[in-house]
Every structure is written in C-alpha cells, then in structure tokens.
C-alpha cells in the first residue's frame, strides 16, 4: 500500500474507534477486542522504526508500561510521530502480558489521538515493503 492507502486505512480505523463504546471496544467478560484491534495490529507492523530516533525515549523509559501511550491525549503533542507509533506498538505488544492494554488509551482518547497523529505524519514514516 502507498501513503494514500495507509491514510484511508487510518481514517477508517479512527472512524470505527470513534463509533465504539468502551464495552464494544473490549469485552471484559471474554477479554476480547472488537475486530478493529486487528486493523491497529496491521498498522503497527506497516512502518519501519528508526531506532536511533528512539534512543533517548528508550533510555528514559526502561519499564514497559512507561513506554505505552500516555493517558492524556495532549501529552502526545510534545512527541514526534515515530515515538507515538512506537508507543502504540508497545501497548499492543504488551497485550500478551496485560489483558486490556489498549483499553485505557481508548477510554482516555489517546488511542484515537495517536492514530490521528500517525495519519497526519505519514510523510515522516517509511512504509515496509509488502
């Protein structure tokens, strides 16, 4: 996919998230997400990460949860898009250890805000070859 296709994918994912209630997004009885989680997973594997740009962030956040998306969406304003993208991937990756790792960012609005920043910063991202 090219940048325009990824922009459409992000727009669709954002619109879906904005239409969901917390209970629709994550079913606490079954510990399962809405199918939009798959779309988020695809997005987190779509672009290369420049690890050199993340060195300072990695050094400052040695504990996994400190690497997640912040719960206050305005905290994303001070971050570069590559850091936001990396943090989104960290939230998703930690799902294997913490059921519902995406729930708090969803409920706080930072998940949608992060995806919007990624969409708006696609020109800074390097798309992986398919």
Image (cartoon, rainbow, N blue to C red):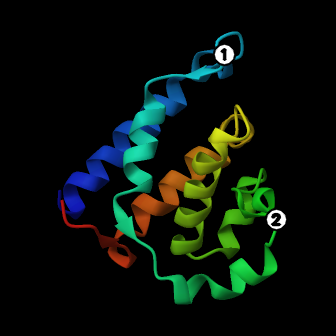
Can you say whether 23 is above or below 73 in the image?
above
Badge 1 crowding class, 10 Å Cα cut-off, few under 14, some 14 to 19, many 20 or more, is few
Labels 2 and 1: the sequence-earlier one: 1
Q: Residue at x 50, y 22 (%)?
A: 34
Q: Which mark is residue 63?
A: 2
Task: Report how far apart the C-alphas of labels 2 and 1 lie in the structure.
Answer: 28 Å
Q: Position of residue 24 (x, y in %)?
A: 58, 16
87 sits to left or right of 123: right
> Which residue matches tag 1?
23
Q: Residue at x 28, y 54 (%)?
A: 6
Q: Position of residue 10 (x, y in %)?
A: 37, 48
Label 1 SS: helix
Q: Residue at x 50, y 52 (%)?
A: 115
Indicate the quadrant containing the C terminus: top left, top right, bottom left or bottom right.
Answer: bottom left
> Total of numbered circles in the picture?
2
When asked about the image quadrant of residue 14, the answer is top left
When asked about the image quadrant of residue 20, the answer is top right
Label 2 SS: loop
When asked about the image quadrant of residue 41, the answer is top left
């Amino acid at each position: 996919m090219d940048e325009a296709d990824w922009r459409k994918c992000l727009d669709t994912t954002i619109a879906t998230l904005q239409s969901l209630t917390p209970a629709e997004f994550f079913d606490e009885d079954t510990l399962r997400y809405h199918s939009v989680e798959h779309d988020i997973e695809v997005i987190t594997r779509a672009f290369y990460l420049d690890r050199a740009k993340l060195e300072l962030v990695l050094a400052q956040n040695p504990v996994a949860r400190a690497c997640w998306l912040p719960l206050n969406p305005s905290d994303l304003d001070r971050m570069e898009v590559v850091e936001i993208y990396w943090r989104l991937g960290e939230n998703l990756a930690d799902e294997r250890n913490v059921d519902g790792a995406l729930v708090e960012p969803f409920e706080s609005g930072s998940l949608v805000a992060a995806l919007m920043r990624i969409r708006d910063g696609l020109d800074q991202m390097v798309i992986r070859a398919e």
